[in-house]
Image (spheres, grey):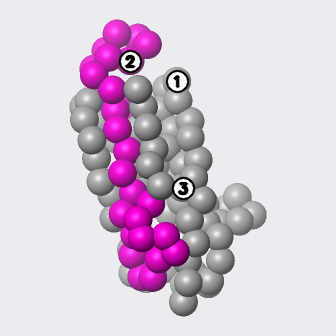
Amino acid sequence: AFNLYQNYPNPFNPSTNIHYTIPNVTLSGVEGSRVQLKVYDILGNEITTLVNDYRDAGIYNVEFTMNNLQLSTGIYFYQLKTENFVQTKKMILLR
């Protein structure tokens, strides 16, 4: 099954890891899927896109680093979206 795991560490500063899995067989019977992984602020504004590509079945890790982003302390959301799956999790930035 598709799965989006809680980021680690949480709370984070300046970076955190986000893990997700793509199943071997999806509902369409095809291995892999088109994947979007995005970060949003508390108001639902998109902060950044971490992944926007086709991914084969497997386990993936993406590092979210604030780099040049001017983010304030607070709650942010990250969302994994595929053709037939959407899941959102909360993460906290502490400065």
Vertical placement of residue 44 versus 32, above or below: below
Q: Which residue is mark 1?
A: 84
Q: Is residue 8 visible?
A: yes
Q: Give the crowd class for mark 2: few <14, some 14-19, many >=20 residues within 10 Å.
A: some
Give the answer, above or below, for where 15 lies relative to 95. above
Q: Horizontal and vertical percent for residue 67?
A: 39, 81
> Which secondary structure class fits the magenta region best?
loop
Q: Nearer the N terminus, badge 3 or badge 1?
A: 3
- Please state, as top left, top right, bottom left or bottom right, where the C terminus lies in the image: bottom right
Rendered location of residue 76, percent (x, y): 61, 66
CA–CA distance in space, label 3 to label 1: 17 Å
What percent of the width, then of the height, locates residue 22?
34, 33
Looking at the image, which residue is at 60% across and 59% down?
A: 90
Residue occupying the far top of the picture:
29
Q: Are marks 1 and 2 in contact (CB under 8 Å)?
A: yes
Give the residue at mark 3: 78
Task: Give the vertical position of 51 relative to 24 (above or below).
Answer: below
The residue closer to the viewer here, 51 or 77, is 77
Question: Could you tell me residue 57's position as x and y percent?
Answer: 26, 30
Quarter of the figure that contains the N terminus: top left
Amino acid at dot 3: Tyr
Residue 46: quadrant of the picture: bottom right
| 73 part of magenta stretch | no
Circle 2 sits on which residue?
26
Determine if residue 36 is in view: no
| Horizontal relation, residue 53 to residue 68: left or right | left
Q: Earlier in the sequence, mark 1 or mark 2?
A: 2
10 Å crowding of disc 1: few (<14), some (14-19), many (20+): few
Identify the residue at image location x=43%, y=13%.
Answer: 27
- Tell me the kind of residue under disc 2: Thr
Q: Which residues are magenta?
A: 7-34
